[in-house]
Amino acid sequence: MIIGTVVNASGLAQARLMANSVKRQMPFAKVLVCLVEEIQAGTLPDVDWIFTAREISAYLGFEDFDNYIFKFNSLQCGTAMKGLLLTYLLEAFPGEEHIVYLDPEMYVFKPFNEIEQMLSYYDVVLTPHHLEPSVPWDCSREIGTLQDGTFHSGLVAVKNSWEGRNFAKWWMKIIAGDFSGQPSGIFTDQPYLNFVPAFFNAGVLRHPGYNLAFWNLHENGRKLYRVGDEYCLTNHTPLCCANFSNFLGLLNSCIDTYTPHDGTYRQMWNEYQLNWAWLSLQHPAQPWAYDYFYSGEKIADETKLRYRAAKTDHYVEANPFTLSNHSDF
């Protein structure tokens, strides 16, 4: 099994935490990091390979990388590269039967036995954001999930098969943002996963121990307990992996809302933050290379939006990084 993830330089500390957790639970698994920066990061502990996004794109014969990455901001760099990375892993490592994409905020607590079992029947395995419906008088969570995507793109498993490779290529193409009517927001890769069970031989992993995160802390089947040195959920279900995304402070907020008197989740989150802070000293946050024109001028969000709109209407010949915020596309 190969575990792949995508980060910019500011996310290397979390990528290392994820890689370390993978190696502790699945020592024979390999970890590959796709770094969306111009400069290589060298070697990293617990990471078997690290390549830049440009290197991975070149391997696939994707020659228009500058025009591709210009459309995205630093938060969306993972969104931009997930399909490309899965396609690369399936082609570059034909001897590896199972490929898993994990967000760098993920932390592994148990081997992915359920995923491996499902990949013996399915070519793609998806994990839903929610496993329980909301109360009848409040469907706001379902409405929000319809906009963001039913399935979480932070954990996608693929078999190295004809069907699996077709899925990766389809996802790579459709999340490129080169079509009119694209989903809005930051996580524009996720809504397309809604189609995967219809388009491909895909299975839905309904194990509550995968993808424990701020968006499902309210679920009755995901109450967290600590038994000895291990974490488990309702009915002694083992916790396999947690997503420690704290986007807009939502993890802190949901802990206060849904587990205000239970210190188990807070303890787990605090332990993660301590390790993250220690590694962040070695990998401090820094400006993203693709947020700037070659001149050094910061690229405005409005400029990226104008460029994306222009690309859907006509071919833009110039390398966008050679231009400025005042350029016409």
Image (cartoon, helix red, strand yellow):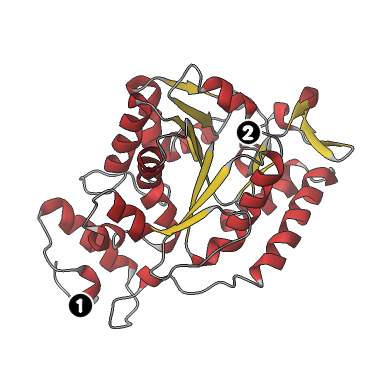
Is 61 left or right of 115, judged from the image as shown?
left
Residue 21 or residue 143, whichever sits in front: 21
Residue 21 or residue 46, whichever sits in front: 46
Where residue 328 appears, as percent x and y from the top left, is 14, 71
The reply to whether dot 1 and dot 2 touch (C-beta < 8 Å) is no
Q: Residues within 10 Å of mark 2 (few under 14, many from 20)?
A: many
Where residue 236 appears, as percent x and y from the top left, is 80, 25
* Residue type, mark 1 in image: His
Residue appearing at x 47%, y 63% in the figure: 8
Question: Does residue 3 sit above or below 319 in this rendering?
Answer: above
Name the mark on residue 326.
Answer: 1
Residue 252 or residue 160, whichever sits in front: 160
Hey, which quadrant is residue 34 in on the image?
Answer: bottom left
Mark-to-mark CA distance, 1 and 2: 46 Å
Residue appearing at x 72%, y 34% in the figure: 239
Where residue 302 appears, as percent x and y from the top left, is 29, 66
Sequence-earlier tag: 1 or 2: 2
Residue appearing at x 36%, y 68% in the figure: 290
Question: Does residue 308 sit above or below 98 in this rendering?
Answer: below
Q: Which residue is mark 2?
A: 210
Question: Does residue 106 sit above or below 288 in this rendering?
Answer: above
Instruction: Identify the residue at the far front of this view.
Output: 95
Q: Residues within 10 Å of mark 1 (few under 14, many from 20)?
A: few
Q: Would residue 113 be visible to someone looking at this image? A: yes
Is 291 left or right of 255, judged from the image as shown?
left
Residue appearing at x 68%, y 34% in the figure: 240
User: Which image quarter is the N terminus in?
Assistant: top right
Q: What is the secondary structure assignment of the residue under circle 2?
A: loop
User: Which image quarter is the C terminus in?
Assistant: bottom left
